[in-house]
Image (cartoon, rainbow, N blue to C red):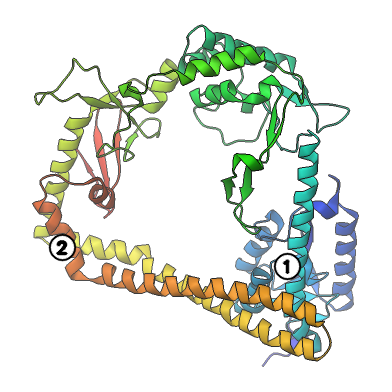
Amino acid sequence: MQNLDEKEYVAGAYTRLSVVESGNGEESISIINQKQYIKEFAEKNGIALYDYYVDDGYSGGNFDRPGFRKMINDIECGVINCVITKDTSRLGRDFIETGNYIYKYFPEHDVRYIAILDNFDTERPSEADDIIPFKTVVNDMYLKETSKKIKTIRHKLMDDGLFVGSSVPYGYKRSDEDNRKLIIDEYAAEVVKRIFEMKLDGETPGMIARALSDEGILTPNVYKERKREETITTNLWKPSTIKHILSNEVYIGTLIQGKYGRVSLKSKKKKLLPKSQWVIKKNNHPAIIDKKIFEKVNAKDNKSCNCDTRNVKYDYLLKGLVVCADCGKTMLVRRVPSRAKNAKGETRSIFCCRTYANYRNHVCSMHYFREDTLNDLVFKEIKRVFTQYSKDNLLNIEYEKTLSNGNVLDKYKKELDEQQEKLKYLDKAISELYSDKNSGIISEDEFVNIKKDLEKEKKNLTHSINDLSKMLGTSKNNLTSNKAKNKMINDFLKLENPTKNILSEIISKITIDKNKKVRIYFNFDINGVV
């Protein structure tokens, strides 16, 4: 066997500093110090450094950081086989994910991990190893406390009427004296005033958007030079943008903040908070629109008749599945005037290009397809394909191929295995916690608080494992059962009127081009043009 001293290590030096700790846009002093510390350690221990992976201004609460992702990619490519950090908190502060990388990911990829100040080295076991799980818990607790402090500071700034958002509302800009104060952007403010005037003149948001696009007026995102993915509609005003401007109280000097909050500390997902929790500051900054004009515009919208058929939502059979082949946007379904009824006396509906409907002659083309005709065409084509393939058993082969390629069961199994590994890690952490208390490393109060957090995590994880186990069993029975597969095929062939759910299981999407050619994409890799 190869001795440890004989093995050559090529290391990645990972450094990180959170937004709270960094404080300025230049590379932080702490990052520079971390780099130097790791460099000296590597030279002293004969470890070659391949690169420095830096995340300056990124929280340790999650691992979706550019420097960290680049390092993991280099590990996957076999470029580096060692990771060095100043301490474990630089790797991350979420104790479950940090533990997952230290005790599972790095060993599975034959990667040596060294945390210098913690005297921790996966290739050189020592007494320090026993304290690492406890330190990751402490790091996690620090993250929670820091998050609370940041939230308190942000809330205080909101209460003081200062803008804490990252993107300033169109029509305003940041003050040179205080970048948290809003002042009027004269050019954009004139566009906002014109939007309100056009609405008062009876123009719809769609008409206003088209007029601004025709004149080449830059959209808010382009005007603010925000980095966005370039699409065919990037430089075109959208009706939804006009509606947002017309209903935004910021233009009468009212600043509303704190409308959304994260569902949890470690999740990026946000939810709308009750209005009682919003921070609303009236007469906070210079107004662009007179309050009476704002109220008149919005009162006019509220008087729209609820009986208007355009406001009635219908659950069309193929809605959401039909896509414009030319621009790639989902096609709209619109009801035509009541005088144009079909043979059964029913009001007709058509699928039309969403892009053309919103922007007219700027992009795409005016093409449409009758909804009832498309329903009949698609239903007949599915029956034809199912009948043809079921006769020579090719459909069964395609079904098995899709099942195999989808790796549905493997995904559930992998997730279940990961959750069970995390549960083992939690059990180990709880066990070691008792030892730390008995050894006097932590106090009784610290023991109780940490144990409470760990047991809460364990309870949630146990529920998740139980749910995954049931899902795996159910999916295995459903996906691998010949009876279930044949039943789906035969039941469809007997159907007179298919449901929306059944069609969604069979069809991936339907495209219609400007020549009205319809292409059906099946979920079973059987594609046809009709």
Mark 1, secondary structure of its residue: helix
Up the image or down, 397 lies above or below 182; here it is: below
Instruction: Identify the residue shown where x is 28% and y is 67%.
Output: 479
Q: Which residue position holds label 1?
A: 140
Image coordinates for residue 283, horizontal then vertical, percent: 75, 23
Residue 219 image position (x, y, % from top left): 60, 22
Residue at figure coordinates x 78%, y 87% from the top left:
437
Amino acid at the residue labelled 1? Asp
Quarter location, residue 292: top right
Q: Is residue 204 above or below residue 168?
A: above
Residue nearest the observer in this picture, 215 or 272? 272
Q: Quadrant of residue 14?
A: bottom right
Q: Does residue 492 appear left or right of residue 68 in this picture?
A: left
Q: Earlier in the sequence, mark 2 or mark 1?
A: 1
Residue occupying image coordinates x 56% and y 13%: 296
Q: Is residue 237 above or below residue 422?
A: above
Task: Using a 10 Å C-alpha cutoff, classify the residue at mark 1 as few (fewer than 14 neighbours), some (14 to 19) or many (20 or more).
Answer: many
Q: Residue at x 16, y 58 (%)?
A: 489
Q: Give the residue pinned by disc 2.
A: 487
Q: Quadrant of the N terminus?
A: bottom right
